[in-house]
Image (tube, rainbow, N blue to C red):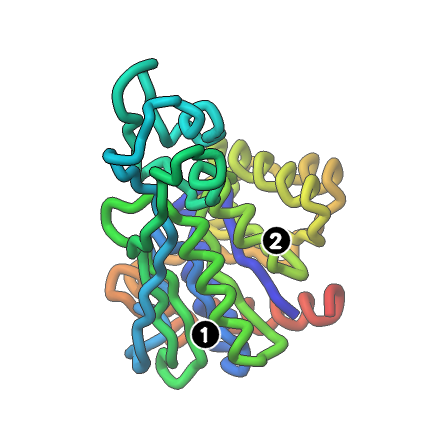
Amino acid sequence: MKIAVASGKGGTGKTSISASLVLARPENLALDLDVEEPNLNILLGAFEGGVLPVSMPIARIEGSKCVECGKCARSCVFGAIAWMGAGFPVINDSLCRGCGLCPRVCPTEAIYEEDQTVGEVRSGTCGGIPFLEGRLRVGSVNTVRVIEETVKKAKAFNRPDWLMDCPPGTACPVAASLRHADMALLVTEPTPFGRSDLEGMLELTADMNIPTALVINKTGIGDLSLDDLCTRFGVDVLARYPFSRSAAECGARGESPFKTDAGWAEITRTLWSRIERRYS
């Protein structure tokens, strides 16, 4: 079973719970798909393995062949090619998605593509646990490309059970991660911001038709009820983690509370039992 741990907002404790689930079931393949801020490895242990570059084709223009017709700019649905009606078109690398359309529509073959490194995939083990991490190159915006390459490398491990630590939010990187999941485990907190962002996540998983369950973290720092959202979207709360100063201190030290907080570890084991009973 492939489980995606996600949250509508940052700071809910998503990665702490992801790491705890992995440590409780180390036979799972751990994937860090939060490629803009990967940190699951910190909580799992020392990384051992290799690094593979992630590249994608970016459009380029050979000026000597360009006849300034503007067909490339008019065809680009991503707005990556700017043309003012005269002169050579200008390509914005940050907007180019390497779809290959502009070379096809160019009548003089003035446009070609060249590979550009946009990130990397770290593949190996963390604390002895099979592990992959996508890492976006600084300055790059091609988050989804790095996520997809990380998932592609994960398939080569031939392990049926994955635990994916997904990006926060409800944008394209989250959807790109969730589409590989058999179920989504949404981590939230009982606060107004937590509720608001959770609603957006529940709408996303409902639209994608992904079985979904909730984990409420930091109970006690807020008392906002989420029962109406659970009823509306037909989801269950599988675990509640109380706010814990010791857990917060563990995170600040780069340690998992699963290893030091007996109560936290017991909740995690119970959470696994409920996941396996209801969704496997």
Q: Is residue 46 positioned above or below 68 on the image? A: below
Gap between marks 1 and 2 measured at Cα? 34 Å
Q: Is residue 77 positioned above or below 212 on the image? A: above
Q: Three-letter amino acid code at disc 2? A: Arg
Q: Which mark is residue 248?
A: none
| Residue matched to label 2 | 179
Label 1 close to label 2 by CB (< 8 Å): no
Left or right of residue 93, residue 177 in this image = right
Instruction: Using the rendered view, name the quadrant where residue 162 is placed.
Output: bottom right
Q: Is residue 96 positioned above or below 67 on the image? A: below
In percent of the image, x 42 and y 59: which residue is there?
15
Q: Give the number of the mark in front: 1 or 2.
A: 2
Please name whichever residue, 218 or 195, is drawn nearer the observer in this view of the structure: 195
Q: Position of residue 29 (x, y in %)?
A: 51, 75
Secondary structure of the residue carrying tag 2 is: loop
Please name whichever residue, 66 or 15, is drawn nearer the observer in this view of the structure: 66
In percent of the image, x 32 and y 38: which residue is there?
94
| Residue matched to label 1 | 262
Q: Position of residue 5 (x, y in %)?
A: 53, 57
The answer to whether residue 65 is seen in the rendering is yes
Left or right of residue 230, residue 222 in this image = left
